[in-house]
Amino acid sequence: MNVLAAAERAKGAGLLVFTIGLGQDVDAALDAAPDARAFFESLPTFYRKDYARWLDSAKRPETRARRIEEFVALLRAGRRER
């Protein structure tokens, strides 16, 4: 299930929702790896925010691309942290 779709449904039900924006490049990588997306969405907010901070701290596009690849591999391996 897509996080944004779930957030919209929760908002419609009157619930307070916090979403983490990761960027289109990360979203595309997670779309290509549904198992990684499912694991990421199951993580507590703390771990999701930690991954987001790590990805966003990359200063060069090459570094971000490399981190996204590692991010997906870590999620596929069931790792909560890097």
Image (spheres, helix red, strand yellow):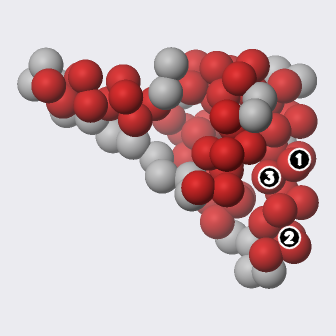
Image coordinates for residue 13, horizontal then vertical, percent = 13, 19
Q: Secondary structure at mark 2?
A: helix
Left or right for 7, reference 66: left
Residue 81: quadrant of the picture: top right
Q: Given the image, on which type of amino acid does mark 2 rest?
A: Thr
Left or right for 65, reference 20: right
Image coordinates for residue 51, horizontal then vertical, percent = 67, 48
In space, the residues marked 3 and 1 are separated at their CA atoms by 5 Å
Identify the residue under disc 2: 63
Q: Residues within 10 Å of mark 1 (few under 14, many from 20)?
A: few
Identify the residue under disc 3: 68
The answer to whether residue 81 shows anywhere in this view is no
Q: Residues within 10 Å of mark 2 (few under 14, many from 20)?
A: few
User: Where is 53 relative to 73, above or below?
Assistant: below
User: Where is 24 relative to 77, above or below?
Assistant: below
In space, the residues marked 2 and 3 are separated at their CA atoms by 9 Å
Q: Given the image, on which type of amino acid does mark 1 rest?
A: Glu
Res. 70 mark? 1
Res. 11 mark? none
The answer to whether residue 39 shows anywhere in this view is yes
In space, the residues marked 1 and 2 are separated at their CA atoms by 11 Å
Identify the mark nearer the N-term, 1 or 2: 2
Q: Residue at x 55, y 47 (%)?
A: 49
Marks 3 and 1 close (CB-CB < 8 Å): yes
Comparing 18 with 35, the one in front is 35
Q: Quadrant of the C terminus?
A: top right
Image coordinates for residue 2, horizontal then vertical, percent = 49, 27
Q: Secondary structure at mark 1?
A: helix
Q: Given the image, on which type of amino acid does mark 3 rest?
A: Ile
